[in-house]
Amino acid sequence: DSGVTQTPKHLITATGQRVTLRCSPRSGDLSVYWYQQSLDQGLQFLIQYYNGEERAKGNILERFSAQQFPDLHSELNLSSLELGDSALYFCASSPRTGTLNYEQFFGPGTRLTVL
Amino acid sequence: DAKTTQPTSMDCAEGRAANLPCNHSTISGNEYVYWYRQIHSQGPQYIIHGLKNNETNEMASLIITEDRKSSTLILPHATLRDTAVYYCIVRAAGGGNKLTFGTGTQLKVEL
């Protein structure tokens, strides 16, 4: 158990819909990362937040957005869903940012299926 | 971040050492080598990292060649629970904290 929690575990929805994935980082971790893992693209970094502020952006679509709240939990919002958005979405946390020696701790993931 | 090359798959007998190679011939002086693994769609798990010296922890050993162009992750006594995809990642100091995953090596540990 990494200490990172993600809800829901599974999500099935239809094309065009909007969903919200939630992540609670390990106690005390200020940095949250979102990754997407699909069969054809592998594990890809989406976005990072540090203490409530966006810190880095990766291959995140404009239809996707994220935020980190004052209690440090984070939400990833996916809208106008397409079949290709079906994937595993992982959240990870680390104590700080810009400090290389802190590894990232990953949650169990949310499996999104778009029908 | 430097690109890495790993074999697609490897097999290992339970109880034997598993040696997973990684080529990172374009690595720069300030780039670290990290290893993560992912057990069947679970979240990736950190294993070990190093800059140029060999490193060992309770999970594994990391051997980095003197020219730093390649490294080997060693699981000294592989068990069935070590069956996973192992990712070798090269990450620059100060380059942000995102992890860039390649395709990794599928390690299968068998009886």
Image (tube, helix red, strand yellow):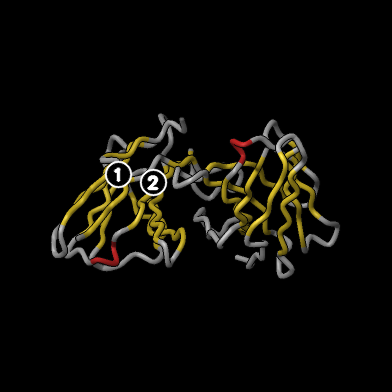
Q: Is residue B48 left or right of residue A98?
A: right
x, y percentage for residue B27? 71, 65
Q: CA distance from mark 2 to mark 1?
A: 9 Å
Element marked by disc 1: strand
The residue where tag 1 is placed is A74
Q: Is residue B79 above or below residue A64?
A: above
In front: B42, or B10?
A: B10
| Count of numbered labels shown in the rendering | 2
x, y percentage for residue A66? 28, 53
Amino acid type shown at disc 1: Ser
Q: Is residue B73 left or right of residue B108?
A: right
In front: B51, or B78?
A: B78
Within the image, what quadrant is residue B104 found in?
A: bottom right
Amino acid type shown at disc 2: Cys
For mark 2, name the chain: A
- Disc number placed over residue A91 in the picture, else none: 2
Q: Residue at x 64, y 57 (%)?
A: B9
Residues at discs 2 and 1 in contact (Cβ within 8 Å): yes
For mark 1, name the chain: A
Element marked by disc 2: strand
Q: Can you say which quadrant of the picture contains the C terminus of chain A?
A: bottom left
* Mark whose residue sits in front, 2 or 1: 2
x, y percentage for residue A110? 32, 46
In front: A114, or B101?
A: A114
Q: Are marks 2 and 1 on the same chain?
A: yes
